[in-house]
Amino acid sequence: QVQLVESGGGLVQPGGSLRLSCAASGKIFSINGMGWYRQAPGEERDLVATITSGGSTIYADSMKGRFTISRDNTKNTVYLQMNSLKPEDTAVYYCNAMIRTDYSGPNYSYWGQGTQVTVSS
């Protein structure tokens, strides 16, 4: 079994910062792409940012310059540093990882349980 556990969400004022973490554990042979997505009430789940095992990143346009995704491959952990937060960033943030559980198997997509981020004064 593989688990992704997120942490770091909470309530922050507009203009503030938060750092999300997501640690993968369990039967892991290798982790390829990792990423963050978010879902606001009544909305679809949208891409925030992704990062490859080699460190290449992709960001949604509205996050460029404010959010930074990074990962520590030694800890099987992905991070999301969020700065200059806005009320419209309020959402549940989910991490995702493409994980191979043995050397010959395919990559499977795993999701964390989500962490609430609320930006409000």
Image (spheres, grey):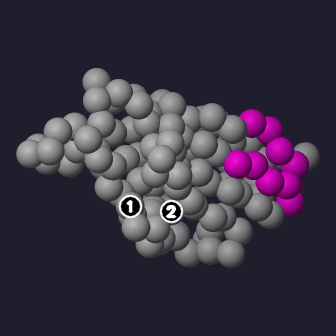
Q: Residue furthest right?
A: 121
What amino acid is at disc 1?
A: Ser
Task: Between label 1 and label 2, give the one nearer the viewer.
Answer: 1
For the residue labelled by badge 2, is the local secondary structure a helix, a strand or a loop?
A: strand
Q: Is residue 99 left or right of residue 13?
A: left
Q: Is residue 11 magenta?
A: yes
Question: The N terminus lies in which quarter of the figure?
Answer: top left
Q: Is residue 10 above or below residue 20?
A: above
Q: Is residue 69 left or right of residue 15?
A: left
Distance from the alpha carbon under mark 1 to that under mark 2: 14 Å
Q: Which mark is residue 105?
A: none
Q: Is residue 92 left or right of residue 88?
A: left
Say how many tags the image has: 2
Residue 115 versus residue 52: which sits nearer the camera?
52
Q: Residue at x 57, y 61 (%)?
A: 69
For the residue labelled by badge 1, is the local secondary structure a helix, a strand or a loop?
A: loop
Q: Is residue 104 magenta?
A: no
Q: Which mark is residue 49?
A: 2
Q: Residue furthest left?
A: 104
Q: Is residue 116 above or below residue 38?
A: above
* Quadrant of res 12: top right
Residue that badge 1 annotates? 53
Relative image position of residue 56 (x, y in whole percent) = 44, 72
Q: Residue at x 40, y 67 (%)?
A: 54
- Is residue 91 visible in the rendered structure shown here? no
Q: Residue at x 29, y 47 (%)?
A: 30
Q: Magenta stretch?
A: 10-19
What amino acid is at disc 2?
A: Ala
Q: Residues within 10 Å of mark 1 (few under 14, many from 20)?
A: some
Relative image position of residue 29 (x, y in whole percent) = 26, 41
